[in-house]
């Protein structure tokens, strides 16, 4: 019993409980980068992850499309060519032993060419 307590205490000291962005051995406290973050329809965006300790990725582009690539390229298209649209992109980074971290989201704005 004493050994379990010491192990749990050491795990808390090393990994903490933070602000919900750290789970196990994956750390994702900054948003992934995107280039560009806005532009005319259709808009091709290159994403770069910033997670530490990640071995797997699940990107959600806010338009019902996803990717498991580390650094994907995605093309956004407007649903209505007359209306600008903002997409919220999220990344869940996975580590070993079923650990994961939800990274801060990114907003991508696609502008109408009309």
Image (cartoon, rainbow, N blue to C red):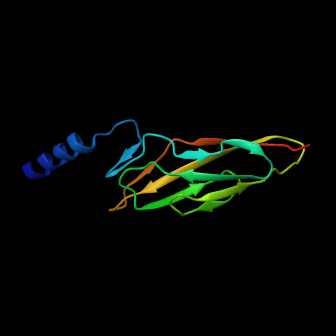
Would residue 17 be seen by someone viewing this image from the given angle?
A: yes
Q: Does residue 77 appear to the left or right of 2 in the view shown?
A: right
Q: Does residue 65 appear to the left or right of 69 in the view shown?
A: right
Quick one: quadrant of the C terminus? top right
Would residue 109 be seen by someone viewing this image from the given angle?
A: no
Residue 76: percent from left, percent from top: 73, 53
Q: Does residue 10 appear to the left or right of 103 in the view shown?
A: left
Residue 111: percent from left, percent from top: 80, 42
Q: Is residue 68 above or below residue 42?
A: below
| Residue at screen point 88% across, 48% down | 81
In this view, the residue farthest toward the top is: 19
Residue 97: percent from left, percent from top: 32, 62
Say which of 94 and 3 sits in front: 94
Q: Does residue 50 appear to the left or right of 46 in the view shown?
A: left
The count of marks equals: 0
In this view, the residue farthest toward the left is: 2
Say which of 70 and 64 sits in front: 70
Residue 96: percent from left, percent from top: 34, 62
Residue 13, quarter of picture: top left
| Residue at screen point 39% across, 57% down | 54
Residue 86, quarter of picture: top right
Residue 107, quarter of picture: top right
């Amino acid at each position: 019993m004493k050994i379990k307590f010491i192990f749990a205490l050491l795990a808390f000291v090393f990994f903490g409980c933070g602000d919900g962005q750290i789970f196990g051995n994956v750390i994702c406290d900054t948003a992934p980068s995107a280039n560009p973050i806005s532009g005319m329809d259709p808009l091709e965006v290159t994403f770069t992850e910033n997670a530490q300790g990640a071995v797997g990725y699940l990107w959600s582009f806010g338009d019902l499309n996803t990717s498991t690539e580390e650094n994907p390229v995605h093309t956004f298209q407007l649903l209505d060519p007359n209306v600008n649209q903002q997409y919220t992109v999220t990344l869940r980074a996975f580590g070993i032993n079923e650990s994961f971290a939800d990274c801060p989201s990114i907003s991508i704005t696609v502008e109408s060419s009309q």
